[in-house]
Image (cartoon, rainbow, N blue to C red):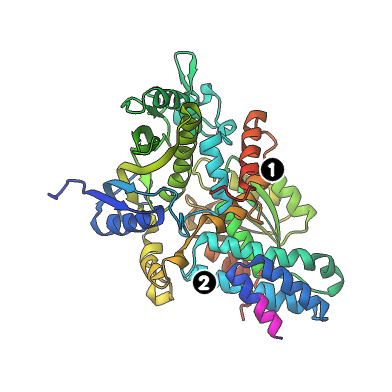
Amino acid sequence: MKPGNIPVLTIEEETIPLAYERAIREVWEKGIGIKTEYDHPEDPPSKDATVMIAVREPFGQPRFHRSFADGLGGLAEYVMEVVHGAHDYWVKPLEEILKGTESKDTRWTYTYHGRLFEYAMEGEVVNQINYMIEKLSRAGHTRRAQAITWNTKLDPPTEDPPCLQRVWGRLCEDGEGGYIFNMNTHWRSRDLFKAWFENVIAITTLMRKIAEAVSEKTGKTVRLGRYVDICDSLHIYGSYFREIQGDPEKGIKSFFEKLESRSFEERTWNSDFIKPFFIDDGVGKGLRPMLAREKEMPGNVRDAVAEELRKMEEEDYVV
Amino acid sequence: MKIFEKIAEDVQKGDAEAVEALVKEALSTGAPVEGILNRGLVEGMNVVGERFKNNECFIPEVLVSAKAMKMGMEILKPLLAGSGVKSRGKVVMGTIRGDLHDIGKNIVAMLLQGAGFEVVDLGADVPVERFVESAKNENADLVGMSALLSTTMVNMKEVISGLKGAGLESVKVIVGGAPVTGEYADNIGADGYAPDAASGVDVAKRLLEIRTA
């Protein structure tokens, strides 16, 4: 790639943890150095690349990597935020959002669930995921089953606009009378080292929800196909370099040494191990503590999370 | 005692069920509560804290071990009052008002408990007054605050002023979080700054002048 050109990387792996590790290695080795507004002045420039990552089996095991910036209960709560809107009530009122960076209200300006399921437009609210389900159920081959997040009025003035831009899906016949659901997501920007993995766990759970809803509507089997994740800027922030490079003088391992010191099984978990922690991680997070703690969560959302909890408590449910 | 080492090992592995069973077994054989706590649960979590500091384990693994430690603690809790076991200090902590991101605070809280501190976790989005009231009511030695946003970290200064206003000058204050720097901590009058979760315990020990063996 000529100087000044952002590298373009393509990764295809069987499972999420395999794709995640490879993406970290490739962006670290091949990414261009770009200083961003999130880097501290003393930090080195971030590593950055345009990346397309395909995961052939999004629920293939082991599904969970151990390297992410939260606990397992926290990850479960994030999945509920994206799939069921558990934190839509943390979004500030429109008049505060319109103040942009002048707003003193520290609540959020959006959630992915809010934008995908309740996109506000011309005084109306559009459930884009329902549209995708309806469209795919009527014509699985459609190229129009998509949902966007970007709000051209609200997002440009805010400090932290949505990274996810678009979700697109399509059904293909599986040759056995059923369908395979293929889904792509498009991201303008992504923190690879501390956000990608959690994003993908949540968004592939949404992928399964869409497939289940289409199956219910059509009465046909809908299995999950490959998940494709496209980032305009997939980056590793300069402030993480210390953690990635380690400090041999102080006996601090590099991230890659940490990976190499363990077998793949010792750096991942399968869904069976994770499930009890999703229900209650024992240190204050998970679906059960979340329902007990978040008293202001609206009733319909609470019901959806409680239903998810009920399903998780069943033996054959895969998180 | 071999059983203490086994408890410590199972805390490191994050095997909560095994820890629960071993703590019960240790108690049934008359093992001292202090030994089960300090040489078993706390020792196990201390090793996890050291491994985390040296970048040898992942964040979720710390919390899986913390669950195992807590399972053991729950059994010991009713027995601790009469056992004469003293904590290394009492820490009131939370994320600052307006800030809902609490993972850093949660890890520090677990590592502090693992290092023998008593932790009063106020949770996320904690109002200034609640930090001050809790520090007073709990007779805290240390207040820990974290912020992930530059827009919320300004509230840390209000807590420090509130503590002083309530006559709690002797309570040490430690701050941390992504946008917080050592310089900022000095400017707002904090006693300590933890650049990452792993160093939070060391800073707490230093502030309370606790020697590490």
Residue A131 seen in the figure: yes
Q: Amino acid at mark 1?
A: Arg
Which quadrant of the figure contains the C terminus of chain B? bottom right
Question: How many marks overall?
Answer: 2
Check disc 1 and report its element: helix, strand or loop.
helix
Left-right relation of B9 to A188: right
The spot of residue B129 in percent (x, y) is 71, 43
Tell me the chain of label 1.
Answer: A
Check disc 2 and report its element: helix, strand or loop.
helix
Left-right relation of B120 to A48: right
Q: Is residue B147 above or below residue A95?
A: below
The answer to whether mark 2 and mark 1 are in CB contact below 8 A is: no
Residue B165 seen in the figure: no
Q: Which label number is shown at residue B51? A: 2
Q: CA distance from mark 2 to mark 1?
A: 31 Å
Q: Is residue A130 magenta?
A: no
Residue range highlighted in magenta:
B2-7
Q: Main secondary structure of the magenta part?
A: helix
Viewer-proximal residue among B181 and A61? A61
Q: Residue at x 52, y 21 (%)?
A: A95
Q: Is residue A48 above or below residue B204?
A: above
The spot of residue A149 in percent (x, y) is 41, 29
